Image (cartoon, rainbow, N blue to C red):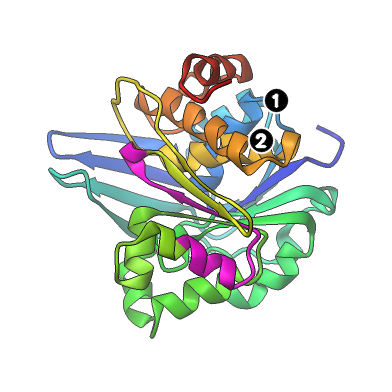
């Protein structure tokens, strides 16, 4: 890929082990930027990724990025790879442990070929881009989006969470830099200490966002703008593994948002992308990520009135 990508995903890609109550699987390629970049590229969105790995990263884990056509100019080999242990309990709640972590990503680490991309998406595991560097990184794109899972949400390590005086202040301070703010309902409850997705979405708008997206797991998604509010129901499917569901939702959301600038259509496309992914298991793989035509078919077969 020689031209500037339309979408650039920023954050650490990881080598991930997944612990289910009845099985252990991995290592897989994981993380929001890995899921989002591969899923978006599969939908014909010109996508790049900016991340840091160590020489210890198994090269075969990176193959889905290559196979999907993601621009990998922004992958730097530095000190170490972020490795994680994703642990699900019987109720489906998750805990993430970080045996090793790569160094943080700054504006200097973003290739010049990515500058002036149409949309820059910072989607960290655990504060991958430090808050003091956010403004400089965001300035490299025309439109900006963030996943708060790594800024006060459930992706954040226990150590960083305990060292943060106020998760609400952290998340809301981060939200001020972005046009589009995304959090899961679990993230929002962790950040604010109360469970009210609509109130959380409004809070992010109050801090400057134009679009606020709260993913609701099996209940679909919630989207707020300054003028409208939509509840997007989930599409039916046979769920196998919810890992990556929220991240691939955003791949669909951002891909459609780049096409139409319509938050409602974008959220419908996000839900259709996510159900295609969570019907399968296995981390980030080319086979698990639906092509544009597959997502379009799910949208049209759904009950969105299209």
Label placed on residue 259: none
- Looking at the rendering, which quadrant does residue 263 occupy? top right
Q: Residues within 10 Å of mark 2 (few under 14, many from 20)?
A: many
Does any portion of residue 101 appear in the rendered image? Answer: no
Q: Nearer the viewer, residue 62 or 56?
A: 62
**Dot 2: element:** helix
Residue located at (62% from left, 20% from top)? 292
304 up-or-down from 94: above or below:
above
Looking at the image, do the residues carrying marks 1 and 2 touch, with CB atoms under 8 Å apart?
Answer: yes
Which quarter shows the N terminus?
top right
Q: Residues within 10 Å of mark 1 (few under 14, many from 20)?
A: some
Residue 234 coordinates in the image, percent (x, y): 39, 32
Residue extent of the magenta highlight: 201-219
Check residue 304 for magenta coloring.
no
Does any portion of residue 146 appear in the rendered image? Answer: yes
Query: Marks 1 and 2, how far apart in space?
Result: 8 Å
Horizontally, residue 6 falls left or right of residue 68, namely: right
In the rendered image, the residue lying farthest to the bottom is: 165
Q: Nearer the viewer, residue 221 or 20?
A: 221
Camera-nearest label, 1 or 2: 2
210 up-or-down from 3: above or below:
below
Check residue 213 for magenta coloring.
yes
Q: Considering only order in the chain, which callout, 2 or 1, is on the residue closer to the N terminus?
A: 1
Q: Which residue is mark 2?
A: 255
**Dot 1: element:** loop
Label placed on residue 44: 1
- How many numbered dots are placed on residues in this image? 2
- Looking at the rendering, which quadrant does residue 137 occupy? bottom right
């Amino acid at each position: 890929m020689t031209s500037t990508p339309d979408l650039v995903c920023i954050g650490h890609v990881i080598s991930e082990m997944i612990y289910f109550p009845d099985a252990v699987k991995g290592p897989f390629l994981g993380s929001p930027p890995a899921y989002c970049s591969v899923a978006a590229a599969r939908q014909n969105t010109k996508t790049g990724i900016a991340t840091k790995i160590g020489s210890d990263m198994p090269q075969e884990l990176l193959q889905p990025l290559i196979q999907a056509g993601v621009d990998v100019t922004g992958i730097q080999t530095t000190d170490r790879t972020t490795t994680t242990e994703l642990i699900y309990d019987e109720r489906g709640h998750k805990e993430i442990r970080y045996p090793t972590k790569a160094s943080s990503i700054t504006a200097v680490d973003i290739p010049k070929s990515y500058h002036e991309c149409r949309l820059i998406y910072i989607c960290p595991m655990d504060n991958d881009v430090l808050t003091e560097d956010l403004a400089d990184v965001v300035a490299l794109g025309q439109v900006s989006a963030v996943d708060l899972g790594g800024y006060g949400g459930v992706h954040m390590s226990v150590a960083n969470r305990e060292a943060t005086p106020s998760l609400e202040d952290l998340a809301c301070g981060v939200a001020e830099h972005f046009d589009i703010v995304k959090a899961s309902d679990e993230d929002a409850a962790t950040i604010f200490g109360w469970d009210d997705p609509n109130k959380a979405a409004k809070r992010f708008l109050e801090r400057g966002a134009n679009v606020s997206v709260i993913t609701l797991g099996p209940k679909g998604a919630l989207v707020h703008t300054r003028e409208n509010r939509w509840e997007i129901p989930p599409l039916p499917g046979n769920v196998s593994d919810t890992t990556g569901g929220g991240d691939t939702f955003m791949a669909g959301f951002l891909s459609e948002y780049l096409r139409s600038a319509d938050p409602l259509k974008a959220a419908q496309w996000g839900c259709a992308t996510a159900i295609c992914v969570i019907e399968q298991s296995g981390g980030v793989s080319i086979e698990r990520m639906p092509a544009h035509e597959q997502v379009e078919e799910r949208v049209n077969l759904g009950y969105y009135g299209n």
